[in-house]
Image (tube, helix red, strand yellow):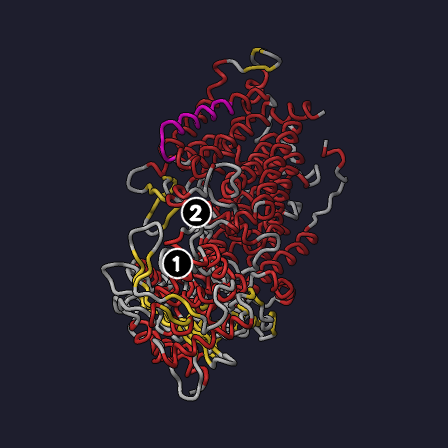
């Protein structure tokens, strides 16, 4: 009987070999694939129970992971509730991290970024738990608080930049929401909060400063003026431009009127600076006709229109349509006809003019620190996005924008003892609704520390430039005052 | 063949067993302490009684072996100790994760079962002085085996757990009688086949080089097949059916040396499986889960297999460390899925070590079968060794996706009294047979030899040479 026993032992050996091969397949060969599966709860728990890096503004955490006694080990909390909601986004066990820095900088915050590789290796050797990197933001908490307070119950957005570096100083979008319930470990509560948020008709989850796209209205006239100066259509702020009560548009039967129905100056003529002060539609419309769509579009592109920026969140692309015919170019020149922009883009326009025509690439993350606060990535050197205008043009535009605040529609942005440059805007978007109120500005005019763009949805008054000046300009003023210490 | 190379006065090797035992106990206690350190950062308060109790238990078996079976195989007990101990550690670890401490814990129950299992094994060694005594009870064990096998079908005491009706409930106790049926049937098959092997192996027609049995000799295999089919259909337990039928076919082959029996057996079983697959959605679902455990539909239905695989994958090569993984996410982590649980925390190295321990266990069983001189002992030893190997293949193969998942326990490790008791009895029987195998020739007990003229053995000697 020994021969069949030996043969059977070969069968037994084969059975065991199959098990050894299978175990190796599962735990070695296919382990990576298995671990990467989306429905794998272990991997999910691994990520969620890791100590995620904090997000810091002015030395205070606006998002941090607090140790708790449950299976996820750390609870993500947002101490400032609604103030930074769209900036941070949220980190939810129930729905993931779809928005904000939690989404855009996930690899840094979770510790999975390539720059943290060396650290992960030492963690593995020393048995230390891998933790995520801490992000320090460029936000000035005073500016953020002022912007939040000034915008109040209005729907809209405020964004402030340091014109010299592109650092984002304030970023407020209203309405906002509280990210804390979404990151709750009570999954029912979190899912419910998510239901409410994702069905919000005001889209409070939307970061309007970078993902809200609006017609820029009259604030766009600054770009038209820049194009006119750069292309030699006018020589300086005192150049004479046409300013009739109505501009006859070629190819169409419609005309482009001024809001008040009056001419902008005696003899249907005015100066460029006065045209900007009173936001003269016919003057900029005729400049648009003279320049043509492509030159306006090219000038806008130099300010950043058409660029897909990441700060590191994705910024919606601002655009001036291509292939504009003459009447469309006239419309675009005053910020109508499908010209679309984000508030950040208009802040970049103001900042570019303030910075001698040089537009700096905007950024939100000042430095990245390891969990024990070693700097991993220090403050980035400012990166120039483009030279949008010559220094000469920029200084002419500054003079004109100062005049808008001192003598024109932007009077409410005046600050005692500080020269403020600005431009109002009122953008029609829906015939049944009031227009959006805009204001872009920077201060001090000669050595700017801050550039601000404000948009208040439905905040204007139809048929008048008053909206931008009355609603949006005071908001910009309060933010500038906060930064300038007034 | 083997007998000729054995030394004239073989050593008992009990000293080697003691050394291996100390090593085994050390491994288990280290694992236990590591678990608590990883979970709570402290050495468990009750480590002294646990360590003392566990050591006392296995050393008792060791001493009984010195006294009652001095020539028994020295490796079986240490391996059983490690496997049982690691199972306990994992059950304790899952208790910690679920906050079931002290007498509420599964580990507490398992420790009691281990004690009972050791007591039963010792009793077997005491009562059964010679394994050949079991041959007297060939048909008694047959009856016992059949009854145990079919007991879960009796209305009132049979219970369906996890889709298979392989449990019985008597009062507060749940029992899987199939575990004991396995032993009873192995004894019956051995006794029966030793008597009938000549008829089954010699008579028949030759077709295409294979000698096929006569029609009337097909009786036994058909009976076994029908029995397996009953288990399959009424208990919905593919694992048990496969185990019993596989055991029978393997022992039939060893007894007759005829490959045709294996061919017939495979065909019969394939037919049964094909029938079950077409007739019962229960099996179709299992196969479906086996083929694609990660599809959203299947995850919705049962994420158990996927969870076990993810657990093992998360352990990778070196494992998360005992107490540091998440085996509790898998349902039945302490019973059917104890192997993935250990694989998660001990890594591929641990999984391979555990599989190899089983392999050595079975190899010692095979060695015993080769060494023992009587045909009944050979058949019983290989039967028991094969049943452990095959059961491990069915359950571990199920959780690693070699075959569809079926509900069987992992020998010595899974939570559950019936499985522990039955497997310790298997080990005790193998120890007893191996004692006979390695004991020097002259010492054949007179009493046994007298009522055992055993014509089978005579034939056997002829065959061996």
Tell me the residue that label 2 is attached to: B304
Q: Tell me, yes or no, whether the highlighted magenta stretch contains residue B281.
A: yes
Residue A470 location, x and y as percent? 30, 76
Dot 2 falls on a residue whose secondary structure is: helix
Q: Which residues are magenta?
A: B265-282
For the residue pair A91 and B162, the one nearer the viewer reads as: A91
Name the residue rendered at 51%, 27% in the picture.
Answer: B192
Q: Is residue B210 visible?
A: yes
Name the residue rendered at 36%, 44% in the picture.
Answer: B161
Quarter-of-image position of residue B153: top left
Q: Tell me, yes or no, whether the highlighted magenta stretch contains residue A180.
A: no
* Magenta segment main secondary structure: helix
Dot 1 falls on a residue whose secondary structure is: helix
Label 1–label 2 contact, CB within 8 A: no
For the residue pair A230 and B282, the one nearer the viewer reads as: A230
Name the residue rendered at 47%, 65% in the picture.
Answer: A101
Q: Would residue B423 appear left or right of B374 to someone viewing this image?
A: left
Residue B426 location, x and y as percent? 54, 42
Instruction: State the mark number for residue A404.
Output: none
Residue B109 location, x and y as percent? 43, 57
């Amino acid at each position: 009987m020994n021969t069949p026993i030996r043969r059977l032992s070969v069968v037994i050996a084969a059975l065991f070999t199959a098990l050894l091969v299978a175990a190796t397949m599962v735990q070695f060969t296919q382990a990576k694939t298995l671990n990467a599966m989306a429905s794998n709860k272990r991997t999910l728990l691994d990520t969620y129970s890791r100590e995620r890096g904090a997000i810091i503004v002015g030395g205070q955490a606006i998002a941090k992971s607090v140790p708790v006694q449950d299976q996820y080990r750390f609870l993500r909390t947002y101490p400032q509730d609604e103030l930074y909601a769209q900036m941070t986004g949220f980190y939810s066990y129930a729905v993931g991290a779809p928005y904000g820095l939690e989404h855009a900088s996930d690899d840094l915050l979770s510790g999975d970024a390539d720059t943290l590789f060396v650290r992960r290796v030492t963690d593995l050797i020393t048995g230390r738990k891998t933790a995520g990197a801490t992000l320090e933001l460029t936000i000035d908490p005073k500016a953020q608080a002022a912007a939040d307070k000034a915008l109040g119950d209005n729907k809209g957005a405020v964004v402030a930049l340091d014109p010299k570096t592109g650092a984002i100083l304030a970023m407020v979008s209203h309405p906002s929401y509280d990210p804390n319930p979404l990151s709750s470990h009570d999954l029912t509560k979190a899912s419910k909060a998510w239901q409410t948020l994702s069905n919000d008709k005001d889209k409070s989850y939307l970061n309007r400063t970078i993902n809200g796209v609006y017609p820029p209205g009259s604030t766009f006239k600054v770009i038209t003026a820049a194009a006119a100066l750069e292309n030699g259509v006018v020589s300086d702020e005192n150049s004479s431009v046409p300013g009739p009560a109505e501009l006859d548009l070629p190819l169409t039967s419609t005309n482009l009127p001024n809001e008040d129905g009056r001419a902008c100056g005696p003899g249907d003529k005015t100066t460029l600076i006065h045209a900007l002060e009173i936001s003269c539609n016919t003057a900029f419309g005729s400049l648009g006709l003279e320049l043509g769509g492509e030159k306006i579009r090219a000038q806008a592109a130099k300010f950043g229109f058409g660029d897909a920026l990441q700060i590191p969140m994705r910024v919606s692309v601002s655009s001036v349509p291509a292939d504009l015919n003459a009447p469309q170019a006239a419309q675009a020149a005053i910020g109508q006809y499908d010209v679309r922009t984000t508030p950040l883009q208009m802040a970049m326009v103001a900042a570019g003019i303030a910075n001698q025509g040089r537009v700096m690439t905007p950024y939100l993350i000042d430095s990245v620190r390891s969990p024990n606060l070693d700097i991993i990535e220090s403050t980035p050197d400012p990166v120039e996005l483009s030279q949008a205008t010559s220094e000469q043009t920029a200084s002419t535009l500054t003079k004109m924008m100062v005049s808008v605040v001192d003598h024109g529609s932007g009077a409410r942005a005046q600050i005692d003892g500080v020269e403020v440059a600005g431009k109002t805007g009122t953008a029609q978007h829906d015939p049944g609704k009031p227009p959006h109120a805009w204001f872009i500005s920077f201060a001090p005019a000669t050595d700017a520390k801050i550039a601000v763009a404000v948009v208040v949805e439905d905040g204007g008054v139809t048929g008048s430039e008053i909206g931008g000046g009355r609603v949006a300009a005071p908001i910009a003023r309060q933010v500038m005052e906060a930064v300038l210490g007034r | 063949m083997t007998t000729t190379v054995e030394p004239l006065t073989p050593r008992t090797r009990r000293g080697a067993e003691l050394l291996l035992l100390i090593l085994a106990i050390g491994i288990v206690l280290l694992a236990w302490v590591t678990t608590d350190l990883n979970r709570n950062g402290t050495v468990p308060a009750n480590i002294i009684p646990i360590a003392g109790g566990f050591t006392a238990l296995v050393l008792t078996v060791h001493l009984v072996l010195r006294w009652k079976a001095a020539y028994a195989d020295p490796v079986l007990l240490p391996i059983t100790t490690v496997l049982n101990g690691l199972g306990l550690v994992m059950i304790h670890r899952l208790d910690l994760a679920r906050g079931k401490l002290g007498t509420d814990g599964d580990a507490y129950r398992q420790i009691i079962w281990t004690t009972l299992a050791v007591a039963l094994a010792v009793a077997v060694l005491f009562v059964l002085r010679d394994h050949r005594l079991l041959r007297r009870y060939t048909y008694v064990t047959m009856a016992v085996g059949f009854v145990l096998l079919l007991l879960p079908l009796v209305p009132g005491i049979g219970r369906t757990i996890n889709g298979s009706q392989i449990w019985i409930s008597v009062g507060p106790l749940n029992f899987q009688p199939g575990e004991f049926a396995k032993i009873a049937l192995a004894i019956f098959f051995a006794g029966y086949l030793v008597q009938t092997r000549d008829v089954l192996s010699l008579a028949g027609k030759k077709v295409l080089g294979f000698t096929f049995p006569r029609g009337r000799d097909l009786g036994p295999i058909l009976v076994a097949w029908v029995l397996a089919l009953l288990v399959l259909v009424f208990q919905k337990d593919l694992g048990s059916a496969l185990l019993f039928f596989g055991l029978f076919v393997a022992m039939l082959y060893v007894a007759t040396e005829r490959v045709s029996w294996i061919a017939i057996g495979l065909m019969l079983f394939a037919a049964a499986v094909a029938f079950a697959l077409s007739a019962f959605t229960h099996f179709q679902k299992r196969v479906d889960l086996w083929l694609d455990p990660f599809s959203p539909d299947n995850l919705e239905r049962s994420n158990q297999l996927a969870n076990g695989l993810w657990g093992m994958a998360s352990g990778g090569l070196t494992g998360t460390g005992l107490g540091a993984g998440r085996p509790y996410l898998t349902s039945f982590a302490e019973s059917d899925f104890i192997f993935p649980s250990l694989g998660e925390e001990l890594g591929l190295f641990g999984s391979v070590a555990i599989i190899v321990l089983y392999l050595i266990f079975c190899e010692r069983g095979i060695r015993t079968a080769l060494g023992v001189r009587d045909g009944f002992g050979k058949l019983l030893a290989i039967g028991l060794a094969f049943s452990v190997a095959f059961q491990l293949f069915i359950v571990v193969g199920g959780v690693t996706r070699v075959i569809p998942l079926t509900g069987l326990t992992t020998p010595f490790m899974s939570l559950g009294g019936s499985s522990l008791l039955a497997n310790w009895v298997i080990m005790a029987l193998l120890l007893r047979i191996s004692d006979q195998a390695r004991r020097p020739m002259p010492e054949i007990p007179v009493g046994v030899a007298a009522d055992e003229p055993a014509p089978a053995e005579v034939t056997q000697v002829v065959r061996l040479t």
